[in-house]
Image (spheres, rainbow, N blue to C red):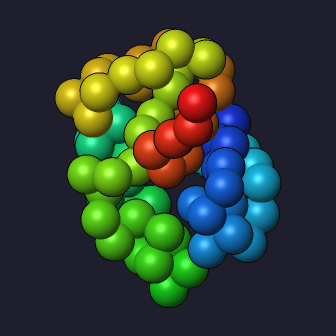
Amino acid sequence: MAIKLRYFAWVRERIGKPEEEVELPGGVATIGDLMTWLAGRGEEYAHAFENPKVIRAAIDRRHVKPQAAIAGAKEIAFFPPMTGG
C-alpha cells in the first residue's frame, strides 16, 4: 500500500525532507507500527523517531493515537508536540 507521509518541525529537519510517498510492507497496521518501521529505515529516521512517545500523528488531517489503524489512509503526518498561546 502506497501512502503519503508528511513531516513537520524537527521531525522534518531530522529526516531531511518535508514529505515522501512510501510503499508500506505487510504487518504495518497502526501508527505505532509505522513509526517503528520508519525508525529502521536509516540513521536520520532512527534519530527522528528515537522517542516515539513524543511524536504526534494525524491521519488525513485528524489527530490520532499510536494504536490507530492506518488502513485506507491517504496521508499521514508526523510532528512534535505543539505549544503556544
Q: Residue 46 lies in what quarter of the image?
A: bottom left
The correct choice, above or below, for 14 with respect to 71 in the image is below
Q: Is residue 8 left or right of residue 43?
A: right
Q: Residue furthest front?
A: 85
The correct choice, above or below, for 55 with respect to 58 in the image is below
The correct choice, above or below, for 26 with respect to 39 in the image is above
Quick check: can you spot residue 50? yes
What residue do we see at 28% from left, 43% from top? 32
Q: Is residue 10 left or right of residue 25?
A: right
Q: Which of 61 and 27 is in front in this view?
A: 61
**Relative image position of residue 67 (x, y in whole percent):** 22, 29
Q: Residue 15 lies in what quarter of the image?
A: bottom right
**Relative image position of residue 9 (x, y in whole percent):** 66, 55
Q: Which of 71 and 17 is in front in this view?
A: 17
Quick check: can you spot residue 20? no
What residue do we see at 68% from left, 43% from top? 6
Q: Residue furthest bottom?
A: 43
What residue do we see at 57% from left, 37% from top? 84
Q: Which of 35 and 83 is in front in this view?
A: 83
**Relative image position of residue 52 (x, y in whole percent):** 30, 56
What residue do we see at 45% from left, 20% from top? 63
How many numbered marks, from 0 up? Answer: 0
- Where's the C terminus, which quadrant? top right
**Relative image position of residue 61 (x, y in whole percent):** 61, 17
- Where's the N terminus, which quadrant? top right
Q: Is residue 46 left or right of residue 8?
A: left
